[in-house]
Amino acid sequence: MNLLSRRSMLAIAAVVDVALHARPDPVPAKALADRHRLPPRHLETLLQALVRAGILKGVRGPRGGYELASERRRLTAGQIVRAAMSSAEDDASIPEPHSKLVDLVVEPEVKTASHAFLAHLDGITVEVLCDAAQARGLISGPDAADFSI
C-alpha cells in the first residue's frame, strides 16, 4: 500500500530529476515529461506548484526550464509532498464526510499517522535521493557531477 498520492510521488521524482540533470542548463518540462512518460501539460501544473512553494525555480527563455531553488541537501521529501498536496485539486469534487465517527476517531488517527509519515519524509533530503540514484547507476556522464552551492 502506498500512502503517497501519484501527484506527490511524481513531485518527488521531478525534483530529484531536476537535481540530477539541471547542470549546466535548467531542465525543460518536456525533457522531464519524456523521462517520466507523461504529457508535458500534465506535469507543468505540478512544476508551477513547486515553483510557488520555493522548491524549484523557473527559468524563462529558449534554454529555460527548471532548477532547484536551494541546495539539494536543504530540500526534503516532506517539503515536496506538502507542496504537492497543497496544490492538489483532485479531491475537490469528493464531498467530505461529517460524522462523530470521522470527527472523533478516524480523523485524529489519520492526522497522527500523517504527521509521523511526513516527519519521516522530512528526514530524507533530495541529496540522499540523488546519491541513491547515482549509486544505482541511473545517471552517468557529465550530469553526474555534484554542484553544491
Image: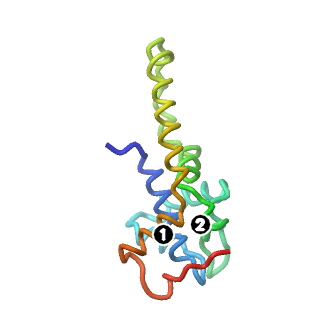
Pick the quarter of the image with the N terminus: top left
Residue at the image point whose x is 49% and y is 58% from the top: 12
- In the image, 123 versus 66, the foreground residue is 123
In the picture shown, does residue 78 fall above or below 47?
Answer: above
Q: Using the image, tell me which numbered label, if any, was put on residue 72.
A: 2
Which corner quadrant of the image does residue 85 belong to? top right
**Residue occupying the far bottom of the picture:** 142
Residue at the image point whose x is 50% and y is 30% from the top: 112
The amino acid type, in three-letter code, at marker 2 is: Arg
Assign a secondary structure to mark 1. helix
Residue at the image point whose x is 47% and y is 13% from the top: 99
**Residue occupying the far top of the picture:** 100
In the picture shown, does residue 41 fall above or below 84?
Answer: below
Q: Could you say where residue 63 lies in the image, as x and y percent from the top left?
A: 62, 81
- In the image, 146 versus 106, the foreground residue is 146
Q: Could you say where residue 48 lies in the image, as x and y percent from the top left?
A: 61, 58
Residue at the image point whose x is 60% and y is 77% from the top: 26
Q: Which residue is mark 1?
A: 130
In the picture shown, does residue 117 fall above or below 63?
Answer: above
- In the image, 58 versus 142, the foreground residue is 142
Nearer the N terminus, badge 2 or badge 1? 2
Assign a secondary structure to mark 2. helix
The scheme the figure's colours follow is: rainbow
Q: Using the image, tell me which numbered label, if any, was put on residue 79.
A: none
Q: Could you say where residue 46 lies in the image, as x and y percent from the top left?
A: 54, 56
**Residue occupying the far left of the picture:** 1
